[in-house]
C-alpha cells in the first residue's frame, strides 16, 4: 500500500502539468474566414465553424485553473475585427485560452469584397476599380492589386459596403499579362456581398 500513494500523487502532478483548451471560430459570414494561431493556419467556409485544441500550461496545484494567451490572426473575405478603442479595423488580437474551456470567436460580416478566380494560363497584372456613390462616379481606375494573381490562383479585396440609404456601386477592369482585359459592370454591393469574377 505504501507505494500506491506516491504513484497516485505523481500521476496527479503529471495530469496537472499538461492541459488544453479550445478555440472555436464561428463564421457567421457567407464567405471564407482565414485564421492563424500557434503557427497553424485554417480556413472556415461560410456559415461553418472550426475548433482547434491549444496547449495550456498548468501548475501542479490540482485545483488551480490556468490559461495561456495566444495571438490570433483572423480576417475574412468580408470580415475584419473592429477595434473600438482605436477606431480602426485590425487583423489580429490576443485571446486567452483557459484550461478545459472553449473560447468562441464570432466572425460577423463588416465588408463587401471582390474576388478574382484566375483559371487562365497567365497571370492577372492589374485589377482596377470604379466606384459610384448613389450612382455618381467618385473614383476611377483605382488600382487594387499589389502583386500579380498567378495562373490557377485566386485573390480577394475587401470593399466598403452600402450603408443606410447610401448605395455604393463598384465596377472592375481585369488586365492580363498579354494586355487583354475584361470589364465587370458596376454592381451595388451590400455588407457580406462578394463580387465573384471567374476568368477562364
Image (cartoon, grey):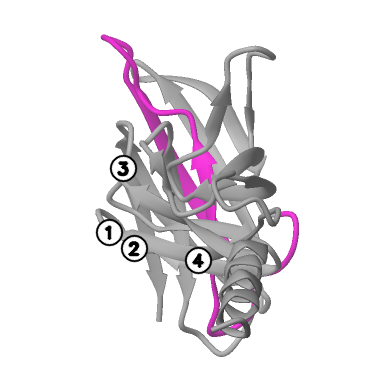
Single out the mark in the foreground, 4 or 2. Answer: 4
Mark 3 vs mark 4: which is more N-terminal?
4
Q: Earlier in the sequence, mark 1 or mark 4?
A: 1
Q: Quadrant of the C terminus?
A: bottom left
Contact between labelled residues 2 and 3, with CB atoms less than 8 Å apart? no
In the image, 194: left or right of 20?
left
Q: Position of residue 21 (x, y in %)?
A: 50, 57
Are discs 1 and 4 less than 8 Å apart at CB? no
Mark earlier in primary sequence (3, 2): 2
Q: CA distance from mark 3 to mark 4?
A: 32 Å
| 191 sits to left or right of 11 | left
Q: Which mark is residue 193?
A: 3
Residue at point 54% right, 62% down? 20
What is the crowding at mark 3: few (fewer than 14 residues within 10 Å), some, or many (at least 20)?
Answer: many
In the rendered image of this protein, does residue 115 appear above or below residue 93? below
Q: Are marks 1 and 2 in contact (CB under 8 Å)?
A: yes
Q: Which residues are magenta?
A: 146-174
Between marks 1 and 2 in the image, the one whose residue lies nearer the viewer:
1
Q: Residues within 10 Å of mark 2 (few under 14, many from 20)?
A: some
Identify whether 47 is placed above or below 113.
below
Any magenta on residue 156?
yes
Query: Residue beneath label 2, please?
Result: 45
Q: Position of residue 104 (x, y in %)?
A: 40, 44
Q: Position of residue 149 (x, y in %)?
A: 63, 71
**x, y percentage for residue 8?**
56, 75
| C-alpha gap between disc 4 and disc 2 | 19 Å
Badge 1 local density, few (<14 within 10 Å), some, or many (20+)?
some
Amino acid at each position: 500500500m505504501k507505494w500506491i500513494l506516491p504513484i497516485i500523487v505523481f500521476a496527479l502532478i503529471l495530469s496537472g502539468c499538461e492541459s488544453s483548451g479550445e478555440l472555436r471560430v464561428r463564421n457567421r459570414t457567407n464567405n471564407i474566414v482565414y485564421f492563424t494561431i500557434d503557427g497553424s493556419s485554417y480556413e472556415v467556409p461560410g456559415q461553418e465553424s472550426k475548433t482547434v485544441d491549444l496547449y495550456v500550461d498548468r501548475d501542479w496545484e490540482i485545483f488551480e485553473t490556468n490559461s495561456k494567451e495566444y495571438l490570433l490572426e483572423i480576417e475574412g473575405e468580408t470580415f475584419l475585427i473592429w477595434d473600438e478603442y482605436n477606431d480602426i479595423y485590425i487583423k489580429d488580437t490576443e485571446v486567452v485560452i483557459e484550461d478545459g474551456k472553449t473560447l468562441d470567436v464570432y466572425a460577423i460580416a463588416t465588408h463587401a469584397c471582390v474576388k478574382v478566380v484566375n483559371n487562365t494560363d497567365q497571370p492577372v497584372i492589374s485589377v482596377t476599380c470604379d466606384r459610384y456613390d448613389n450612382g455618381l462616379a467618385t473614383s476611377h481606375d483605382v488600382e487594387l492589386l499589389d502583386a500579380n494573381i498567378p495562373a490557377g490562383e485566386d485573390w480577394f479585396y475587401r470593399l466598403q459596403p452600402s450603408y443606410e440609404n447610401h448605395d455604393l456601386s463598384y465596377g472592375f477592369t481585369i488586365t492580363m499579362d498579354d494586355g487583354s482585359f475584361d470589364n465587370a459592370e458596376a454592381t451595388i454591393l451590400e455588407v457580406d456581398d462578394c463580387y465573384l469574377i471567374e476568368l477562364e
